[in-house]
Image: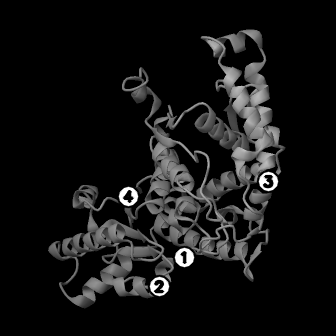
Amino acid sequence: MQTPVDATNTPAWATLAHLQSILIDGPHVMRRWFDADPTRAERFSLDAADLHVDLSKNLLTDEVRDALLELAEQTNVAARRDAMYSGEHINVTEDRAVLHTALRRPRTDTLTVDGQDAVADVHETLDKIYDFAGKVRSGQWKGVTGKPIRTVVNVGIGGSDLGPVMAYEALKPYVKDGLECRFISNIDPTDAAVKTADLDPETTLVIIASKTFTTLETLTNARCVRAWLLDGLVAAGAIDDTDEARSQAVAKHFVAVSTALDKVAEFGIDPVNAFGFWSWVGGRYSVDSAVGTSLAVAVGPKGFEDFLAGFHAMDEHFATAEPARNVPLLMGLLNVWYTNFLGAHSHAVLPYAQYLHRFPAYLQQLTMESNGKSVRWDGTPVTSDTGEIFWGEPGTNGQHAFYQL
């Protein structure tokens, strides 16, 4: 594996520092740029995977863009990207591959990692998830009293919550009628109490999402929800107050997303009803793994396949597009430019579509947990700012709260 390059020692970094010193040459620079170049919006706009990205409203010139692309070349970004895609152990701390891209590769692909075909393993798990989702949606999967499931409660935290709830809220128009998902993450017991207050235990299915099945917040909430469901069934006369009846109810109303099958069984869940994922999937990238089981139930197998296809389309764009037209590359380089040269340490995400109201929180973890590092992968200290603070609100709400500052 290549030695990491100190970006601050590259010629491109020096060029960017010079460009920063001459960029702002008076007030209203952006307006003057547009007046001088009627094609600016077109020239700085890109399309990728059905998304249109307009970079023209950034403090970006042709010279800055070219220097940023030189920086990417001088720091071997393409080689690092290719190493990730191929399954090299770029996570040197844990000696693991980083292969969330394999989660959305087509069934016809192959990718051997540590002697295993990762794509085949992924689709074996997806088939199991799709079978389960189909049974819940059709009413074939029933609760202990024979009633079909109407509410799916996802219990998780971090990547096991932020991704699924973001995607569920974004895709609500595609959720099956008569089916609802709720998400519990906060260890404060009022979260679970409020989310379950108006639910019928007989028609509720709980998904406990924890890779190790040891996460404190998730297990605390899982026990709380288990007690609520079982006590509710007993109080309604739906089951007897015996250990056997309670165990049968757990088997019908609880499934797990975990690789710790022994701990899943200790909780009372049949390991057959556990959906696993792999050490090469980081939590913040896991929404398109089994962690997205609640979403697969909500939008159906076909909807989830379309969801994965969107990810894959952007993966392919990132892997193959020329640098000057590569959307993820350019957006990442813009973050470097703003943070290290323009002094911007806050990045607002302001979706105007209400369905995307949880997108800022999802991006917050995705970017800040990834970039919140003080050393490079070889242990040497970083010499530049690694990222910004991500935050945000739906756009119109923000207009009436903080846009004025």
Percent of width and height locating residue 29: 65, 14
Instruction: Identify the residue at image location x=49%, y=66%.
Output: 138
Asked if the residues shown at circle 2 and circle 1 are in contact, with their CB atoms under 8 angstroms apart, the answer is yes
Residue linked to disc 1: 276
Viewer-nearest of labels 3 and 4?
Answer: 3
Tag 3: amino acid: Ala
Image vertical order of residue 65 relative to residue 159, above or below: above
Residue 222 image-quadrant placement: bottom left
Q: Residue furthest left?
A: 235
Residue linked to disc 3: 78
Circle 3 SS class: helix
Mark 3 to mark 2: distance in Å?
A: 38 Å
Mark 2 to mark 4: distance in Å?
A: 23 Å
Instruction: Identify the residue at image location x=39%, y=82%.
Output: 269
Residue linked to disc 2: 261
Percent of width and height locating residue 381: 59, 57
Q: Compare marks 1 and 4 and give the one earlier in the sequence.
A: 4
Judging depth in this view, the residue of 99 and 375 nearest the camera is 375
Tag 2: amino acid: Leu
Mark 1 to mark 4: distance in Å?
A: 19 Å
Q: Compare marks 2 and 1 and give the one earlier in the sequence.
A: 2
Give the left or right position of residue 350, taking residue 189 as reference: right
Circle 4 SS class: strand
Instruction: Identify the residue at image location x=50%, y=55%.
Output: 163
Give the left or right position of residue 178, taking residue 171 as reference: left
Circle 2 SS class: helix
Mark 2 to mark 1: distance in Å?
A: 9 Å
Residue linked to disc 4: 183
